Amino acid sequence: MIEAVGLTKRYGAKTAVYNLSFQVRPGTVTGFLGPNGSGKSTTMRMILGLDAPTTGQVTIGGYPYRKLPNAPRQVGALLDAKAVHGGRHARNHLLCLAQLSGIPARRVDEVLGVVGLQDVAKKRSKGFSLGMGQRLGIAAALLGDPQVLLFDEPVNGLDPEGILWVRNLMKALAAEGRTVFVSSHLMSEMALTAEHLIVIGRGQLLADMSVRDFISANSADFARVRTPDSEPQHREKLTAALTEAGGQVMPEQDGALRVTGLPLPRISDLAHGADVRLWELSPHQASLEEAYMRMTQGAVDYRSTIDQRAGLQEQLPPGAVPQGQMPVAGQGQPGWYAPPPPQQGGQPFAMPQPQMPQPPQDPAGTPNPYAGAPQPPAAPVPAAAPAPAPDLTKGATDNEDAAR
Amino acid sequence: MTTPPTPQQQPQAQQAPQQPQQFPPQAFAPAGAPAVAPPPPPAPAAPAPPSAWQQAMNNAYSSPIPVRKTHLGNALASEWTKIKSVRSTVWTLGIFLALVIGIGLLAAANTTSSDYNDVPFTIPAFFGLMLGQICLITLGVLVTSSEYGTGMIRTTFTASPQRHRVLLAKILVFFAVAFVVSAGSILLVGLATSAMNSGPEAGDVPWAGTVLKGGLYVSLLGVLALAVGSMLRHSAGAITAMLGVVLVPAILPAFLLIWESTRTLAEKMSDYNAINSLAMIFGADGVDSAGGTSQLVVLIVVTALAVGGAFALLEKRDV
């Protein structure tokens, strides 16, 4: 078990991790998510005693890492696939790590077989591909048969076979009762592997809940509504009606509308009331990726933009008006993922309610508000959250988009 | 799956009483609320009703093989594997041996037995050592700084969070290797020279001490380099710094002697610089009864200071 309490790390003026508290429990794969530079690796290094926290503490099984009597037998870690001496061949690399904790050499050959590197055991790791390096790092983590495992981006550079293998390995390790803590940027992979999520942004905890709760709490579920292509005015009319009823409407590239905040029957009723025919009204459960994007969009430090290639174009003659490019609807447009709701204290996100490790309150477990009978949209229970429900407070900006 | 906790499985056994306190309430608070102070670490509290969390803790995996506490012997074995499994060791020591033995035998072949009337038989090794010490310095630096350069140090310190033990093992293993190689090569040159030059008066000067002191001196220079490498964490920087340590005191006195005020400093420098120290140890400046003992003591003190600094920084810094 990993337990962090009030973990803070400052590098000079920059605060990499601020007041982070979480627990990682055995028996499940816990995913560790966050945008680039959000402090994931710093947290991992603090867990492993490589970086000393400025304040707070983190323990593994009740011990600070550096007080563990035999760290590799208790904690296995893959931090960086390239953190090896390239001039040393794979077997010797693992052997010197094994010897540090009194693990016999035959275990080295065993883990080399487990990760499939036995044929290159005597090759210098300098020549390894990223995927082979990851396998070597995983082998090092498995050496001591540890009860706690940390992996930082383990599937980076792995081939599809390797990704499948890592996914099954993580699940198998967790099923044996081990604590498995994995960071990754591959949301689809995380959705398949992890049961529990810890999400950080700008060094602060954004969420600590099960994957399912995470997706529904960030209610990125939406309904796709399509009106007849031949009658664009109907689309406008429906948009206005839906917006008036409290839904958020965003146009999709192919002319469909993406509606959030309203259950499907209500959308149908509204359309009927506005005398608009529908060609499509379909529920869409958001992927983990979308839920993640919604949650972290306010905490992204490094954001990519569209390459305008303006630096390559000829200078316009003076007086000429550059041709404006119409923004393309779709992902990347502002408000595609709903903006964070305004909250007190400058903290854009709140975890909805204390609901883990207990099962979600709703025993039926229908995270999709459009799926069943008329039920209110997935507005988080207002009890614990000091903030207004994220769904219903963000209409303004979206509607501007939708009106276009 | 679960084995009864043995004394070696302390961490598992000890964490059990902490479990009733399940989640610190803070885990659910808005993470950033700066006013909220971190709650005290969970203390053994009243038993709570069993929960999924506790169940998970009870089913936690523990290795069937007992976990033993690690010790210095483990770190020594590991460092021995490390030092013999990289090419830089082969290269630096190979060049060292080629310089000391090659130049030594060349010099020995071009001398006559009368040359050894007042110098020890190991004096041909001295010429090789003047250059060869650079090799040991390089190896000493690389033993630590190459781990920093490649990122291996993070893997090492994850596998052994007892950092001081790793550094101590590095120093011991490196010193042993350097001393065996340097003293061995000096001994070899001494034996070869004595075999080649068996004149009547030759060999009057005892040379066993030069083998030990010469080997000790260059090995300690290497340990100093290792400590500097550990402090600077950068191969090129540390090697440059060590070249400065060796060369500057040998060159600077020529300038410092110009001024009256710096003359004593210049004399100290020329007495205690690495090259002159080796010359004293080998009695190259004629018969010197002290045999460079004071120079050796100075190097021991400097090395001890550097090693102390390396240990102090090692525990403090992030890697």
Image (tube, rainbow, N blue to C red):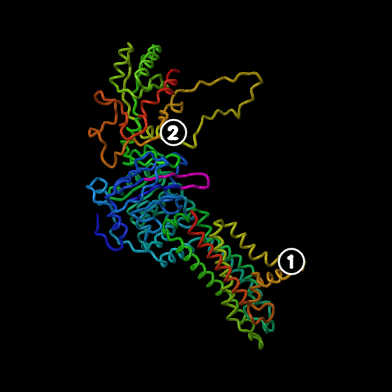
Extent of the magenta region: A9-21
Q: Where is residue A198 shown, x and y percent of the image?
A: 37, 42
Q: Quadrant of residue A394?
A: top left
Image quadrant holding the C terminus of chain A, namely top left
Q: Callout 2, which amino acid? A: Gln
Magenta stretch: dominant SS? strand
Determine which residue is flagged by label 1. Answer: B256
Write the residue at 34% across / 26% down.
A222
The subunit carrying tag 1 is B
Q: Where is residue B304 shown, x and y percent of the image?
A: 55, 68
* SS category of the residue bearing label 1: helix
Determine which residue is flagged by label 2. Answer: A297
Look at the image and say whether residue A17 sits in the magenta stretch: yes
Q: Nearer the viewer, residue B200 or B280?
A: B280
- Give the spatial CA distance, label 1 vs label 2: 64 Å
Q: Nearer the viewer, residue A63 or A287?
A: A63
Number of residues whose C-alpha sits closer than 10 Å to that of mark 1, classed few (under 14), some (14–19) or many (20 or more):
some
Q: Is residue B140 left or right of residue B248?
A: left
- Vertical position of residue B307 compared to residue B195: above or below: above
- Vertical position of residue B308 compared to residue A393: above or below: below
Q: Residue furthest front?
A: B35
Q: Residue furthest bottom?
A: B200
- Vertical position of residue A210 compared to residue B61: above or below: above
Q: Callout 1, which amino acid? A: Leu
Q: Quadrant of residue A208?
A: top left
Same chain assignment for discs 1 and 2: no
Residues marked 1 and 2 touching at CB (< 8 Å): no
* SS category of the residue bearing label 2: helix
Write the residue at 40% across / 19% down.
A255
Look at the image and say whether residue A266 sits in the magenta stretch: no
